[in-house]
Amino acid sequence: METLRLRWADLDFLGRSLIFKDTKNRDPLELPMVPTVERVLRRRLETRCSDVWVFPARNGDNHRADACGSAESRLKETLGFGFSHNDLRRSYLTYAERPPWVSIYTLKRLVNHRTGGDVTEGYLGSDPERLREAAQAIEGAFGGP
């Protein structure tokens, strides 16, 4: 849902980052824009039908309310099985934990999870550049650049 609420103003193509202001846990989140995501977003920018929303509703006045759509349906048909968004998150985290290992603190930051008061995490920086290397390694595990 956070991705569906992205505004064009939340994308920094020069700094290659995404800014999620209204997240599920209410913590704002700035993430690196990995090459595959950047290509998709630049393609959307070229063909945009809204000056505000990256993923506009059909009427263009608001953002999409859900991620179900023809692309997702085609993917499920091609794969021959269904999946949920939590399945995608689980796969992302599972691949990220494989060598070269990404620290649990970095993984939690990439998916915007809290640690429940872990003091050590409070000392770690979480700017997009610190997360970029890990995000690109995970992207590579899925066959990206």
Image (cartoon, grey):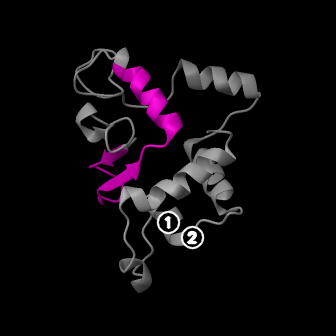
Between residues 99 and 81, which one lies in front from this camera angle?
99
Which stretch did the figure color magenta?
A: 17-45
In the picture provided, is 67 more to the left or to the right than 52? Answer: right
Residue 113 x %, y %: 45, 63
Q: Quadrant of residue 77?
A: top right
CA gap, disc 1 and disc 2 = 5 Å
Residue at x 32% of width, y 45% of height: 15
- Location of mark 2 (residue): 103
x 58%, y 26%: residue: 72
Q: Which residue is mark 1?
A: 106
Q: Secondary structure at mark 2?
A: loop
Q: Tell me where residue 66 appears, x and y as whole percent.
A: 43, 31
Q: Residues within 10 Å of mark 2 (few under 14, many from 20)?
A: few
Residue that lies at the very extreme toward the front in this rendered image: 14
Please tell me how many numbered marks the rendered image carries.
Answer: 2
- Element carrying mark 1: helix
